[in-house]
């Protein structure tokens, strides 16, 4: 157990629907990162939050949004889902934003859009 | 642009032998960290080893070591005494300034033959 908890582990939904992925960071970590990994692809950075504030944004679609709550857990909202959104979505956390803090990853949420 | 390149999509090694996975990166920064992550079939992302750019000494973690060539912007991972459990995708990663966006290479799939 890495200490980063992601729920649900699997999600199957239809095109056009909206889903919410949840992440609880490792105890003491203030930064949360979301990544998308499509089949046999590398990891694409979506967005980062630090202590409740958005810090960096990557290739995140306008249909996607995220937030980090006062208790530091984070949610990634995916709407108007398309078949191409099927992927493994990872949450990672680190103690701070700054050099040298490697990420601790959750086990991911596998999203299948049918 | 800051990119990470893994030129070997697949590698194979005999059990108990040594294998080296290559990674090059592009950066204009002088102080930074580099990471290798392992993704076994479970899809969990696991930190294998990290290297601090200002340290000349190559990092070592048990059977895993790196060959860091700062001038050449090369960061290869050497796995000694390969074990069946080492079979996985290996990703080289470089965090952008302030660790806001970890950039991952496309990955190298390592197969370990008994």
Image (cartoon, coloured by chain):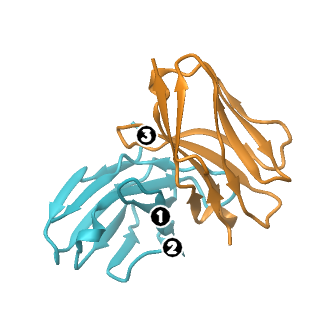
Describe the element under mark 2 as helix, strand or loop. loop
Snapshot quadrant of residue A16 = bottom left
Task: State the residue position of label 1.
Answer: A44
Badge 2 and badge 3 both on one subunit: yes
Could you tell me if the residues under marks 1 and 2 are in contact, i.e. CB atoms within 8 Å? yes
Task: State the residue position of label 3.
Answer: A2
Q: How crowded is mark 2: few (under 14 residues within 10 Å), some or many (20 or more)?
A: some
Could you tell me if the residues under marks 2 and 3 are in contact, i.e. CB atoms within 8 Å? no
Please determine whether, in this image, residue B55 is positioned above or below residue A86: above
Please tell me whether mark 2 or mark 3 is closer to you in this view.
Answer: 2
Q: Tell me the cyan chain.
A: A
Snapshot quadrant of residue B96 = bottom right
Q: Residues within 10 Å of mark 1 (few under 14, many from 20)?
A: many
Distance (Cα) linking label 1 and label 2 = 8 Å
Residue A99, position in %: x, y?
70, 57
Q: How crowded is mark 3: few (under 14 residues within 10 Å), some or many (20 or more)?
A: some
Task: State the residue position of label 2.
Answer: A58
Which chain is home to disc 1? A
Q: Would you say A104 lies left or right of B79 here?
A: left
> Residue drawn 33% across and 66% down?
A75
> Residue drawn 54% across and 50% down?
A103
């Amino acid at each position: 157990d890495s200490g980063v908890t992601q729920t649900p582990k699997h999600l199957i939904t239809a095109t056009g629907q909206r889903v919410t992925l949840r992440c609880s960071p490792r105890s003491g970590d203030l930064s949360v990162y979301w990544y998308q990994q499509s089949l046999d692809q590398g990891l694409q950075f979506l967005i980062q939050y630090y202590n409740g504030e958005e810090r960096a944004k990557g290739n995140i679609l306008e249909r996607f949004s995220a937030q980090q709550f006062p208790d530091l857990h984070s949610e990634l909202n995916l709407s108007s889902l398309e078949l191409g959104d099927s992927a493994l979505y990872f949450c990672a956390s680190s103690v701070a934003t700054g050099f040298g803090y490697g990420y601790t990853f959750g086990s991911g949420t596998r999203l299948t859009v049918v | 642009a800051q990119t990470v390149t893994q030129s070997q999509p697949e590698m194979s090694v005999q059990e108990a032998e040594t294998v080296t996975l290559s990674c090059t990166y592009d950066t204009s920064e002088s102080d930074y960290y580099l990471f290798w992550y392992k993704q076994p079939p479970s899809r969990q992302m696991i930190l294998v080893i990290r290297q601090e750019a200002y340290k000349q000494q190559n990092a070592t973690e048990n059977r895993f070591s790196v060959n860091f060539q700062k001038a050449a912007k090369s960061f290869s991972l050497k796995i000694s005494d390969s074990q069946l459990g080492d079979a996985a995708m290996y990703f080289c990663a470089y965090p952008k300034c302030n660790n806001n966006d970890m950039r991952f290479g496309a990955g190298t799939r390592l197969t370990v033959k008994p």
